[in-house]
Image (cartoon, grey):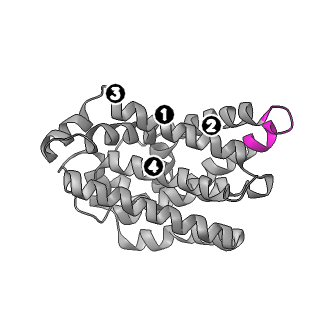
Amino acid sequence: MLRNLRIAFGLLSTLPIGLPEDWQPGESGRAAGWYPLVGLVIGAITWLAWRLCLPYFPPLVTCVLVLLVWVALSGGLHLDGLADCCDGLFASTSPERRLEIMKDPRLGTFGGLGLLLVLLLKAAALSSLPVSAGPGLLLAACLSRWCILPAGLLPLARPGGMGADFSAGLKKSAILLGALLPLGLIILLGWSGLLATVVALLAGSCVLWLAKDRINGVSGDVFGMLIEVTETVVLLAFTFGAK
């Protein structure tokens, strides 16, 4: 259990925990039940940074500083997947060529635009987020990392890579156990948490539909895009009605 917990934090965060040296195939999937906890910790640290910055900086400066903390905690891993997916999924070519584009480390136009748009939306949402809605940061980070668990049951776009390793070790029981944390947050946040969750799940479903349509399945990059999109949508939902 502790090994899986260490793997979850080592894969999804830059916290000084590290991965075991004797890596075994499928371990990223076997650790999946802990992924929402990693999100909860990342969300808690981000929320703390937000609360600490609010009294001392203007809203715009605060949101940029908090966004830096948020990105640093994940090492930009999911943003990289988002950029790769934007470059590949929106290219007018064959599924095979799209997968090749997604493996290319160079950043293309669609990838750059996707990164810019998501970061701007997150920054704008953070600058508009009411203080009372701060716990929405916890839900955004926790729910988004749970979303990749059911996505791991979908067909794979390519046979290798981290996506394949994740799917190989994933158990359905981890999906149910992992759902307990986001479910608890939804209950604590009430109707606003429920609304944010429903909208985020719809957005996540669109991401998975796009991946199935464009590359015939999911991959590690798709999981990264899924996390970024659902995080952003949860934040936007909590700003709904804010003046």
- Tell me the element at label 1: helix
Observer-side mark, 2 or 4, equals: 2
For the residues labelled 1 and 2, the Cα–Cα distance comes to 13 Å
Q: Is residue 12 rendered to the left or right of residue 100? A: right
Q: Amino acid at mark 4?
A: Ile
Look at mark 4 in the image and give the residue it sits on. Answer: 7
Observer-side mark, 3 or 1, equals: 1
For the residues labelled 2 and 3, the Cα–Cα distance comes to 21 Å
Look at mark 3 in the image and give the residue it sits on. Answer: 107
Q: Amino acid at mark 1?
A: Leu
- Tell me the element at label 2: helix
Observer-side mark, 3 or 4, equals: 3
Q: Is residue 36 rendered to the left or right of residue 186? A: left
Look at mark 1 in the image and give the residue it sits on. Answer: 116
Q: Percent x, y for residue 30?
A: 38, 60
Q: Percent x, y for residue 189?
A: 70, 68
138 lies above or below 87 = below
| Label 3 or label 1, whichever comes before in sequence order | 3
Residue at x 30% of width, y 47% of height: 162
| Label 2 or label 4, whichever comes before in sequence order | 4
